[in-house]
């Protein structure tokens, strides 16, 4: 156990998230506590000093570890930032954000060597805990840095490994031509269908089982279209061009074929589809897909679908709550191909309970034989509301270790690279096994534009339905505002007008 004492700052949350990469055995104390009482444990003192003038910001942090009155560790880190007069004139909020970013960084860097040595843990992402590391690369490019300068900056400031640096630089280069030049007039759109045939043990998304909520699907479509029409009429019509449309969930194909047709016909009656470049539907679960539903998608010109096995091992499918077999996955995929779908994504999850590198090799082999255009490789994240997290002792023995996770990611990278797939977007999540990453791979020309836009947050995303989160991007201020729809399905059905009004208020308060 280690006790943490903060001096000159209150970045308790950020430090806690950082320390969780190494250990859960820590707690915070305040200066009024009697050190003699707690001298049985190590005390880490984190001190922060901030100096500001009109020309520059200077931030320094010192971390000391004391045990029984003896200093075991003492490390100081300092950074400076020069302020350009024109760029920062009267922009106190931007300066405050710079100070906050620098402060968190130097605090974590000052602690980093101690915890790496104490726990013998290699962190390829260094102190970079954010979920969108490629977004950072785009920001630095926008500031005028070149790739070589960015590489040096990321290694120096965040202690990132050469391997991860190469990954995010390559992804940024690939993304750049798709998401730039930036435009305030283009938006992406997300439509949430929060139903599933059953709930998988790792799932934390808004998902309502058909056995319990299947009878409200018609009412949900009615309210969902009402929300989209009301929002469109008030703030979108004639002002914004929809570049991509993504229907996700849940599992959208949990709707019956007639319900899917009603939803898509309703969308086309409300929205202008003229300039849409990409229309994705997560077919997702093979046990929800049939020829009639695929025909509906085809008739409405859906250009991209997902068929997500997560694993191609029968035992794993049973453990995670899937109601389909490996053969079902193959049959549905081949049916979609036969019906003319030429842009198919398949998701898999590394680190599922009981899986090892050999099982991942099998999954990759089976998926490559199907030859999809996209393959998204997720690392298992232990989300708070998932069955795995809520009953963690039941699953703990089946979790893989860090070295196996690294092997699994390497297997995927090697095999996909050999077969013509390139990483084109990535993100990280809290509580991922091994503190690693999710990577989307695609064949050249099949990169998913929506995925890139939603990850890098350079375009407003209007989102509709239970659990949907709209993100309003204000490019001139480098600012993003979230507007959430309620997650609870029953509350959503009762309060859909509130969802419309929340979006309208966000737009009006910013004078757009």
Image: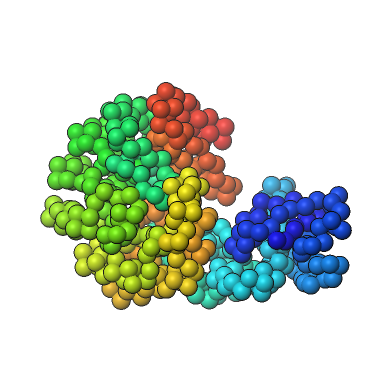
Quadrant for the N terminus, please. bottom right
Q: In this view, does 116 lie to the left or right of 200?
A: right
Q: What percent of the width, then of the height, locates residue 163?
A: 49, 75
Which residue is pictured at 75% across the width and 68% down the height?
A: 77
Splitting the image into 4 quarters, where does residue 233 fall? top left
Foreground pick, 228 / 207 = 207
Q: Using the image, determine if residue 135 lies above or below residue 201.
A: below
Q: What percent of the width, then of the height, locates residue 323?
A: 26, 48
Q: Is residue 469 left or right of residue 152?
A: left
Q: What percent of the width, then of the height, locates residue 20?
A: 61, 59
Foreground pick, 313 / 180 = 313
Q: Is residue 138 left or right of residue 81?
A: left
Residue 423 in view here: yes
Q: Is residue 37 left or right of residue 452?
A: right
Which residue is pictured at 70% across the width and 52% down the height?
A: 12
Foreground pick, 409 / 399 = 399
Q: Using the image, determine if residue 178 lies above or below residue 230.
A: below
Splitting the image into 4 quarters, where does residue 315 fall? bottom left
Q: Using the image, determine if residue 25 lies above or below residue 260.
A: below
Q: What percent of the width, then of the height, locates residue 260?
A: 24, 37
Which residue is pictured at 53% across the width and 48% down the height?
A: 475
Residue 47 in view here: no
Which residue is pictured at 77% across the width and 62% down the height?
A: 41
């Amino acid at each position: 156990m280690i006790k943490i004492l903060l001096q000159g700052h209150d970045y308790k949350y950020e430090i806690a998230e950082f320390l969780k990469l190494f250990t859960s055995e820590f707690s915070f104390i305040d200066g009024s506590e009697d050190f003699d009482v707690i001298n049985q444990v190590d005390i880490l003192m984190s001190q922060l000093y901030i100096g500001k003038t009109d020309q520059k910001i200077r931030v320094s942090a010192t971390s000391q570890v004391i045990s029984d009155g003896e200093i075991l560790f003492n490390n100081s880190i300092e950074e400076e930032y020069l302020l350009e007069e024109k760029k920062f004139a009267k922009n106190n909020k931007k300066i405050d954000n710079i100070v906050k970013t620098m402060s968190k960084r130097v605090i974590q860097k000052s602690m980093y060597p101690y915890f790496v040595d104490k726990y013998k843990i290699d962190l390829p992402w260094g102190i970079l805990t954010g979920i969108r590391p490629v977004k950072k690369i785009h920001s630095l490019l926008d500031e005028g840095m070149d790739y070589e300068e960015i590489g040096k900056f990321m290694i120096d400031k965040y202690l990132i490994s050469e391997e991860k640096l190469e990954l995010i630089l390559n992804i940024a280069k690939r993304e750049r031509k798709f998401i730039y030049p930036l435009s305030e007039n283009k938006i992406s759109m997300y439509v949430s269908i929060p139903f599933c045939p059953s709930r998988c043990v790792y799932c934390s998304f808004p998902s309502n089982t058909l056995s319990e909520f299947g009878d409200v699907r018609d009412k949900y479509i009615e309210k969902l279209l009402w929300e989209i029409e009301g929002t469109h009429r008030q703030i979108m019509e004639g002002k914004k061009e929809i570049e991509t449309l993504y229907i996700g969930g849940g599992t959208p194909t949990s709707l019956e074929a007639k319900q899917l047709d009603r939803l898509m016909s309703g969308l086309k009656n409300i929205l202008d589809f003229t300039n849409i470049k990409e229309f994705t539907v997560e077919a997702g679960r093979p046990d929800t897909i049939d020829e009639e539903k695929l025909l509906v998608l085809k008739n409405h010109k859906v250009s991209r679908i997902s068929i997500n096995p997560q694993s191609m091992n029968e035992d794993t499918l049973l453990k995670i709550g899937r109601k389909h077999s490996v053969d079902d996955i193959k049959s549905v995929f081949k049916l979609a191909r036969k019906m003319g779908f030429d842009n198919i994504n398949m998701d898999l999850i590394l680190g599922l309970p009981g899986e090892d590198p050999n099982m991942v090799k099998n999954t990759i082999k089976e998926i490559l034989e199907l030859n999809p255009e996209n393959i998204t490789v997720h690392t298992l994240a232990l989300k708070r509301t998932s069955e795995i997290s809520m009953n963690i002792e039941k699953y703990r023995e089946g979790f893989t270790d860090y070295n196996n996770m690294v092997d699994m990611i390497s297997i995927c990278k090697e095999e996909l690279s050999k077969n013509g797939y390139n990483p084109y977007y990535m993100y990280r999540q809290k509580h991922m096994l091994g503190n690693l990453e999710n990577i989307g791979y695609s064949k050249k020309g099949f990169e998913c534009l929506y995925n890139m836009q939603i990850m890098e947050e350079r375009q407003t995303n209007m989102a509709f339905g239970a659990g949907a989160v709209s993100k309003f991007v204000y490019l001139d201020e480098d600012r993003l505002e979230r507007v959430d729809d309620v997650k609870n399905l029953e509350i959503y059905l009762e309060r859909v007008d509130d969802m419309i009004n929340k979006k309208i208020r966000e737009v009006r308060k910013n004078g757009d």
